[in-house]
Image: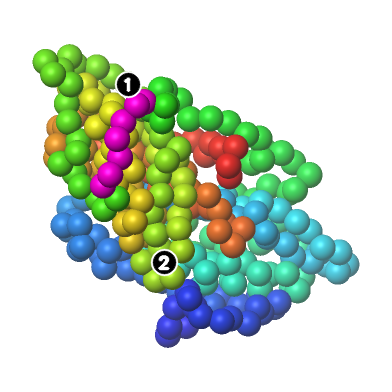
Amino acid sequence: MSKQSPLGKSSSYADKYDREILFPIPRATARSTIGLTADLPFQGEDIWNAYELTWLDLHGKPVVAIGELRVPASSDSIVESKSLKLYLNSFSGSQFKNSNEVGDLISKDLSAICGTNVKVRLVLAADNALTSIGRLPGFCIDLLSVTCDIYQVNSDLLKLQVNAPIVQEELYSNLLRSKCPVTDQPDLGSILISYSGSQIEPSSLLRYITSYRNHQALHETCVEQIFLDIMDRCQPEKLSVYGRYLRRGGIDINPFRSNCETHTKNVRLSRQ
């Protein structure tokens, strides 16, 4: 296994299958920075979509596929995203019998790195099962008239409605932006908040989401921080937070955290 992360460094692109490229990141490291311990207040998963996956069949003919990788939020580790890109590229010059063999191999390697069962589904490029465009459910708060002047995370921005009624609703925004903690590159995405409880003031939620604009954290950590802050400040009975990030290096990362659901749909958005 690699001893150093390839993120932020020049890398050579292997074209023969090599599982040693994969680099694990223990979840506990980032979670400790936001006060999370082994007793998680949520469940969920990270959905990774890989759009640049290719290998050779036994006749040397290239095969192209899209990979859907589901990593449980309870896993010991995640895979560093650049190492995953390099690992998947290493399939490009290797021959395999069929897509099932490739999918099983990826699942085996990622499960070993993450310390849990990672589900892998491959869809050949000719099939549009993973390429159709969808949309997030609920009400988009982006057109609300608000003044945004705080660009570092501030949970004090979250407010409940005055005399807040008990509601069940879904609110989403496409204005989420954070930064990679290693390279400082911007990570843009959409965020869906589904909850039951006292009604959240939507303008305050929008200001809170935009406060991530200069925040440096992994995708997964941002979504977990949002979950924790909403639970702490608004105390909903049920809460699910779903981030849909734009792809980088041919891979998009979509963390889902919930206290009432384990899995969610893989809804590709128009910017993805």
x and y percentages locating residue 13 in the rendered image = 65, 78
In the image: residue 56, left or right of residue 176: right
Q: Is residue 93 above or below residue 225?
A: below
In the rendering, which numbered label is found on residue 184? 2
In the rendering, which numbered label is found on residue 169? 1
Is any atom of residue 240 visible in this view? no
Q: Residues within 10 Å of mark 1 (few under 14, many from 20)?
A: some
Task: Name the colour scheme.
Answer: rainbow
x and y percentages locating residue 117 in the rendered image = 43, 57
The single residue placed furthest to the left in the displayed view is: 163
Dot 1: what SS?
Answer: strand
Q: Is residue 1 above or below residue 83?
A: below
For the record, the magenta segment spans 144-150
Q: Amino acid at mark 1?
A: Glu
x and y percentages locating residue 232 in the rendered image = 14, 40
Q: Is residue 168 above or below residue 259?
A: above
